[in-house]
Amino acid sequence: MLRVLNDKLADGKKVRRDDRVVVFYAGHGGTRKLTSGRDVGYLIPVDASLADFASDAISMPQLQEVAEAISAKHVLFMVDACYSGLGLTRGGGAGSSANFLADNARRLGRQMLTAGGADQQVADDGPSGHSVFTWTLLQALNGKADLNGDGVITGTELAAYVAPSVAAIARQTPAFGSLPGSEGGEFVFELPADREALSGDSPQLDADASKLNKRLDDAKTAALQPGGKGAAKDVQVVIKNLEGGDTKLSTPAAAPVAPRVAAQRANDRGLALFRERRYDEAEAAFTEALKLQPVFALAANNLGFVYFKRGKPAEAARWFERAIEMDGSRALAYLNLGDAQLQAGDDAKALKAYATFVGLAPKHARVAELQGWIAAPDAAHRPKLP
């Protein structure tokens, strides 16, 4: 692991000055008390000896040396291990700027987010085999940590979402801060626009994962406090720093954006909420997207599918038809329209919508069953569709 970090990241050839590097570690951690009385934290690789991990494992001071040696301007360590908060030294803090991205590009950043404090075990019972910390981190990077809605997630925003959320549902307190050598630069993740058109194939979280995500969001809402002045306010949260003390993180309010951009972000929120089966909130988000951008076929389809999932086929069909009016090339809107009209009992309209869908998407997985349904001589001979 150290060879990879030093040879591949710190040689100045493969990683260049304007690059960004994320280092994620999930595994065991441990502590060693020195004769001076100071405790040092270690990451324990799978082949390290637990009896003598001080010789085989990787100490936090070694990670600090790697962080300073890496050529990249911005580096973020994310450590999901027991006792991972131990032995770190906090560096310079980040400031805020109206021209954040341009200013941030000039400043060196070395940040670390850990799963727990120096004396804590970490919970391994999150959804899909993940730890609670890693699951929360993944949800954060999927958009939940964009606290000011500006389309990017900074290292500070990531910590401001993950730390209080994890602390509220598990007996661990994630810590965050800058490492020695940092000049206050922030690691930045850019969120891509979500172009998914909802249909019967759209994945959703299971009930337990959806409930956990709701608890995470509630914990974040309780932890965040409004700050700043004026109508657009920043958000603030108090979490643990890398030395174990309290620190206040502040995320500036986002600058105003064009209605089209705001509509896309509302649509993205709606998709995330749909995947969590939070249909009331998803409906509100898609409705907001359409108010901001009335001709938005993707959002119209997605709003229609929320109505369809809630057992309102007539209302769903109305929105699918509007999506098609806005963009007649959207094959999934025709498929959804056929399903809604079939559920509403209008076989004739369903047949017409299905036929158009088959013509637009002849390789779709449902085409064979739909062709059989369309070719049936009458309703009595039509196979039952899922």
Image: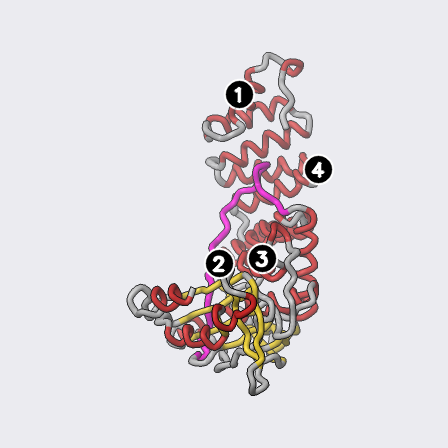
The three-letter code of the residue at mark 1 reads Gln
* Residue 198 magenta-highlighted: yes
Q: Which residue is mark 3?
A: 139
- Chief SS of the magenta region: loop
Q: Quadrant of the C terminus?
A: top right
Dot 4, how many residues are within 10 Å of its Cα: few (below 14), some (14-19), or many (20+)?
some
Q: CA distance from mark 4 to mark 2?
A: 32 Å
Q: Which residues are magenta?
A: 182-205
Q: Position of residue 255 (x, y in %)?
A: 51, 69
The three-letter code of the residue at mark 3 reads Gln
- SS for tag 4? loop
The three-letter code of the residue at mark 2 reads Leu
Where, by quadrant of the figure, is residue 348 drawn? top right
The residue depicted at 70 percent of the width and 53 percent of the height is: 211
The three-letter code of the residue at mark 4 reads Gly
Q: Are marks 4 and 3 in contact (CB under 8 Å)?
A: no
Q: CA distance from mark 2 to mark 1?
A: 39 Å
Q: Tell which circle, 3 or 1, labels the residue nearer the N-terminal end.
A: 3
Q: Nearer the viewer, residue 282 or 210?
A: 210
Q: Which residue is mark 2?
A: 191
Q: Nearer the viewer, mark 4 or mark 2?
A: 2
Q: CA distance from mark 4 to mark 1?
A: 25 Å
| Residue 311: assigned label | 4
